[in-house]
Amino acid sequence: MKVNDYEIPEDLYYTDTHEWLKRENGKVRIGITDYARKQLGNITYVGFEVKVGDEVEFKQPFGEIESEKATEDLYSPVSGKVIEVNVELEDMPQIVEDDPYGKGWMLLIEPANLENDIKNLMTAKEYAEYLKKKLEEE
């Protein structure tokens, strides 16, 4: 699915702060959306405030991403335990630009209450509508 030039994979869930979540065998993989990475432009830094074994909370920052335009916090779309951190992004932040829904993923989390958290997220269709409204306001 696309809105303007922005890719929105249909099998993911989305936040209003432009993070995505993918369900994977009881765990979730998260990253930032195509819209977020294009708005940031040339990404120069990705930093994580969490490590494997840490607990993250729904809508709480877990790191930050920097570009020549801005610095933005990264927010967790679920509560749970960090299983894996894509530390490769710290040395090669451009991976997020090149492949935000693939190799540019950020965390793998074992969710504490996924069914509850997912109620607060958007489906691809809902995110597409949200993005259309946001673009109209810009």
Image (tube, helix red, strand yellow):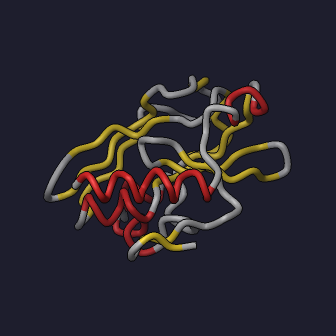
Left or right, residue 8 beside residue 90: right
Pinpoint residue 72: horizontal percent, then vertical percent.
28, 42
What residue is drawn where x is 48% and y is 65%? 100
In the image, residue 86 above or below residue 59: below
From the viewer's side, name the closer residue of 95 and 133: 133
User: Which quadrant, please, contains the N terminus?
Assistant: bottom right
Q: Residue furthest left?
A: 68
Left or right, residue 43 beside residue 79: left
User: Which quadrant, please, contains the C terminus?
Assistant: bottom left
What residue is drawn where x is 78% and y is 53%? 24
Pinpoint residue 59: horizontal percent, then vertical percent.
50, 28
In the image, residue 32 above or below residue 103: above
What residue is drawn where x is 18% and y is 49%? 70
Left or right, residue 94 beside residue 81: left
Left or right, residue 12 beside residue 20: right
In the image, residue 1 above or below residue 31: below
